[in-house]
Amino acid sequence: MPLTSEEKQKVLDALDELDRDDLDKILAGLKAFSKWLKRVLYEIYLQIEDGLQSLWNSIRSFFS
């Protein structure tokens, strides 16, 4: 199921709260991002578990 605009914003806001070192570690690989999302926004993680690669690629582009 695709994320709503509000859900996408929740993910971006949660990432934006991190310091740069933590953000870089989380965005360094899909596994790290997946673990972070599962821990911080579990309800969103469950919705997009199968499409996680696509979301991760988009977010990496946004923060680079």
Image (tube, rainbow, N blue to C red):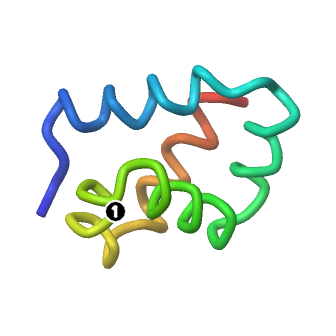
Give the residue type that dot 1 points to. Answer: Tyr
Q: Quadrant of the C terminus?
A: top right
Return the x and y of residue 32 as percentages of the image width and height: 68, 64
Badge 1 marks a residue whose secondary structure is helix
Q: Residues within 10 Å of mark 1 (few under 14, many from 20)?
A: some
The quarter of the picture where residue 38 lies is: bottom left
Q: Is residue 31 left or right of residue 12?
A: right
Q: How many marks?
A: 1
The residue lying at 45 percent from left, 29 percent from top is 12
What is the residue that sits farthest to the bottom in this orientation? 50
* Viewport quadrant of the N terminus: bottom left
Residue at horizontal 28%, vertical 65%? 48
Q: Is residue 14 above or below residue 43?
A: above
Q: Residue furthest front?
A: 39
List x then y, in percent, for residue 58.
Answer: 49, 44
Foreground residue among 32 and 58? 32
The answer to which quarter of the image holds residue 30 is bottom right
Q: What residue appears at the point 23 percent right and 37 percent down from the top-left corner?
A: 7
Give the residue number, with chain letter if any, for mark 1: 45
Q: Is residue 37 above or below residue 52?
A: above
Tell me the quarter of the picture where residue 54 sits.
bottom left
46 versus 43 height, above or below = below
Percent across and percent down for residue 4 are: 13, 38
23 to the left or right of 20: left
Q: Is residue 7 left or right of residue 38?
A: left
